[in-house]
Image (cartoon, helix red, strand yellow):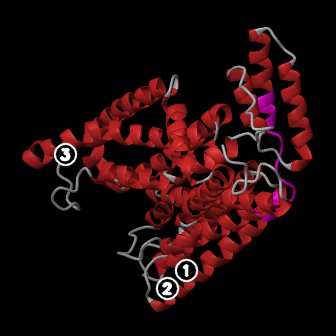
């Protein structure tokens, strides 16, 4: 059941929605120009998604990923043997940080796709975002593959970690490269969110980067704030001096991003906290009574599905990805507080009952301090944040698409006019 919740709350929404978006765009393109125009549209999307300044940015992304992989690899190899002394598993922490980095790459690729789509259309944005992920993978692989070859050729020159099998020392970097598959739907969704509607078959030109910045910041406001966002864009259009345009765009974008919590967000967060706290307590006592190990298997999937539902409901109501994301973030903070508030006393209770560590159920903590620190281990907290965050983002995207489809808005994700 929990594995199903993990799939439902983390892995399924984004790829399914991306498939729906692409299917709708292709169907719209065929209806508009016939199947014979698809090849021409693909070529146009490729040209739009690769011409200047995009290809220069892609080279920079690949080079930056290579430099970052080189630096992080050296830092990892220098610290991996110190985990037992520091009180946590450096390899496991590096693996979950790799998952977090892959999720971050997906978000940045989606933002890049939205920016290009705002200027050049959905197809160009999708191409640019997908190529950004490819550039990250290529830059990372250009550093990782020679390092792995050196490790396989002379493992004695590398640190030895007792709990790792042969050839597993560099697994965090392989986890990152594999997890980039998670990021593939987000350029599609970002391009769909960023692409503007066309009027009379013509796309409005993007005047400069400041218009693009304000367009993106105000494109996804709740319906109650959409008129305010349109007024900001109109006021920017009337400003000519570049310095004034820059100041106004930054100020407007910042105001839009902090435009307030969704209605009822505090009540939703309180409900999340109560459900996670109650579920954690019930899972703890049931696992202890039935000798089923710790409750890390509850902490990861159950709140992920819950945050998916919260973000989806809010985004559906407001027709806003940003609203759903803010509601999911507030709910995630509440869930983390609930996990820690229940986990600390339960960890001590498990120690006294000789049940082992609360997280995994193995061994028995020697002291109550060790039991408490197990709940606060950074690798466990980071892995929860990763999966909860992906669940909330997927719910926000799905709720936005469903909400716009419900109201028949012109910027509907699956049903927008083809580019």
Q: Nearer the viewer, mark 3 or mark 2?
A: 3
- What residue lies at 72% left-to-right and 67% top-to-bottom? 272
In the image, residue 199 lies at what x, y percent? 80, 38
Q: Earlier in the sequence, mark 3 or mark 2?
A: 3
In the image, residue 150 lies at what x, y percent? 13, 42
Q: Residues within 10 Å of mark 2 (few under 14, many from 20)?
A: many
Horizontal arrangement in the rendering, residue 331 relative to residue 221 (left or right): left
Which residues lie in the magenta part?
Answer: 252-269
- What residue lies at 48% left-to-right and 58% top-to-bottom? 383
Disc 1 to disc 3, how far (Cα)? Answer: 41 Å
Q: Main secondary structure of the magenta part?
A: helix
Residue 281 falls in which quadrant of the image? bottom right
Q: Is residue 399 above or below residue 189?
A: below
The answer to whether residue 99 is visible is: yes
Give the residue pinned by disc 3: 148
SS for dot 3: helix
Residue 260 falls in which quadrant of the image? top right
**Depth check: 27 or 148 in front?**
27
Q: Which numbered tag is attached to residue 288?
A: 2
Task: Tell me whether circle 2 and circle 1 mark residues in contact (CB < 8 Å).
Answer: yes
SS for dot 2: helix
């Amino acid at each position: 059941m929990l594995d199903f919740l993990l799939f439902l709350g983390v892995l399924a929404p984004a790829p399914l929605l991306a498939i729906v978006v692409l299917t709708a765009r292709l169907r719209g393109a065929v209806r508009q120009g016939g199947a014979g125009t698809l090849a021409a549209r693909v070529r146009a999307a490729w040209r739009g998604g690769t011409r200047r300044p995009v290809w220069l940015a892609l080279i920079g992304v690949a080079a930056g990923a290579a430099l970052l992989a080189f630096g992080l690899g050296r830092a990892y190899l220098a610290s991996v043997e110190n985990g037992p002394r520091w009180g946590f598993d450096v390899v496991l922490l590096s693996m979950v940080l790799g998952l977090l980095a892959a999720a971050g790459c997906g978000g940045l690729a989606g933002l890049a796709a939205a920016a290009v789509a705002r200027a050049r259309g959905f197809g160009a944005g999708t191409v640019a975002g997908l190529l950004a992920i490819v550039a990250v993978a290529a830059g990372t692989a250009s550093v990782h593959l020679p390092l792995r070859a050196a490790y396989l050729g002379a493992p004695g020159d590398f640190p030895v970690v007792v709990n790792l099998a042969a050839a597993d020392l560099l697994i965090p970097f392989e986890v990152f490269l594999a997890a980039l598959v998670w990021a593939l739907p987000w350029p599609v969704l970002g391009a769909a969110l960023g692409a503007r509607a066309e009027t009379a078959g013509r796309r409005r030109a993007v005047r400069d980067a400041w218009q693009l910045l304000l367009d993106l910041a105000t494109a996804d406001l709740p319906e109650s704030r959409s008129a305010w966002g349109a007024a900001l864009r109109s006021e920017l259009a009337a400003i000519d001096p570049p310095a004034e345009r820059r100041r106004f765009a930054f100020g407007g974008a910042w105001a839009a991003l902090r435009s307030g919590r969704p209605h009822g967000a505090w009540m939703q967060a309180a409900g999340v906290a109560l459900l996670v706290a109650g579920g954690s307590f019930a899972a703890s006592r049931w696992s202890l009574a039935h000798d089923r190990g710790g409750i890390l298997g509850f902490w990861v999937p159950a709140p992920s599905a819950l945050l998916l539902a919260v973000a989806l409901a809010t985004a559906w109501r407001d027709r806003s990805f940003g609203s759903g994301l803010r509601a999911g973030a507030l709910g995630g903070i509440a869930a983390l507080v609930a996990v820690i508030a229940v986990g600390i006393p339960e960890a001590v209770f498990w120690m006294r009952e000789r049940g082992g560590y609360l997280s995994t159920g193995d061994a028995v903590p020697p002291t109550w301090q060790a039991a408490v620190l197990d709940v606060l281990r950074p690798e466990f907290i980071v892995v929860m944040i990763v999966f909860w965050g992906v669940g909330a983002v997927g719910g926000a995207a799905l709720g936005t698409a469903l909400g716009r489809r419900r109201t028949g808005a012109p910027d509907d994700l699956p049903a927008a006019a083809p580019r």
